[in-house]
Amino acid sequence: MSKADVQALRASIAVIEAGRRQAREVLPFGLQAVDSRLPGGGLALGALHEVAGGGTGAVDGAAAALFVAGIAARTNGKVLWCITRRDLFAPAIAQAGLTPDRIIYVEAHDEKSVLSCFEEGLRHGGLGCVVAEVSHLSMTTSRRLQLAAEASRTMGIALRRWRRQTEAADFGQPTAASTRWRVSVLPSRPLPVPGVGRHRWLVELIRARAGESADFELEACDEQGRLGLPRELSNESVQTGLGRRYASG
């Protein structure tokens, strides 16, 4: 066997192993409409993901944080959550399935320190998920985070938050994240009796590497971190009238 044949065989084995690993190491949402748009049928565990609120207001930002909490709640092990502001509402996070005994909070004095903690957490290898609240995320930094996540097979989520309107434009810049999500609040479904129904979100999958972008109208996370499909939409696979787009990467 020639040297070229050996190299070709090694390349083929690497492709097969990568495919098997990708198929095995994903976190499904449990909703066919969503999972069918993601490669492997779910969020890649050893990868970096981005999530932001649909606007610059606190309400959409809180919905994005709860969306992240629901994802993290469905991973195994402790969750490292890196912050610069003490404004997370722990009871709401717990209602999204992520109980206080599973979270390790790290408060840093600036965003550079948050990113350092983010990367160290991903390299640790013993955490179920690492979340970091950041306003800026460069391509270089995101590549480093993606490589750290791949090496440890730990999910990393960059929760994008902004103090000023001008900072929100950074969310449209290219990064190495595998998926990019935007979450906005919708009115809840009216109940037959006085009260407030389960919260609803417009969840936009803006970018999915090797997948397909789409928009979904979903019910907010339950106490186990699971999203729901509104009853009246359960027979539809995806909301096609909400600005459907296709991924570039």
Image (spheres, rainbow, N blue to C red):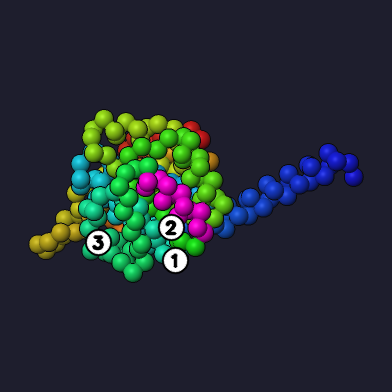
Dot 1 and dot 2 residues touching (CB under 8 Å): yes
- Name the one closer to the observer, 110 or 47: 110
**Magenta-drawn segment:** 113-125
Local secondary structure at mark 2: strand
Local secondary structure at mark 1: loop
**Residue position for label 2:** 129
**Residue position for label 3:** 90
| Alpha carbons under labels 1 and 2: distance apart | 8 Å
**Could you tell me which residue is drawn at 38 percent across and 52 percent down?**
131
Tell me which secondary structure the magenta stretch mostly adopts: helix
| Alpha carbons under labels 3 and 1: distance apart | 18 Å
Can residue 150 be seen here? The reply is yes
- Name the one closer to the observer, 226 or 101: 101
Task: Reply yes or no: does residue 216 show up in magenta.
Answer: no
State how many labels appear.
Answer: 3
Relative to 193, is 58 above or below? above
Q: Quadrant of residue 241?
A: top left
Q: Earlier in the sequence, mark 1 or mark 2?
A: 1
Dot 3 and dot 1 residues touching (CB under 8 Å): no
Q: Residue furthest left?
A: 194
Query: Could you tell me the amino acid type at mark 2?
Result: Cys
Instruction: List x then y, in percent, for residue 28.
Output: 46, 57
Local secondary structure at mark 3: helix
Q: Earlier in the sequence, mark 3 or mark 1?
A: 1
Instruction: List x then y, in percent, for residue 168.
Output: 29, 34
**Could you tell me which residue is drawn at 67 percent across and 52 percent down?**
17
**Residue position for label 1:** 77
Query: Could you tell me the amino acid type at mark 3?
Result: Ala
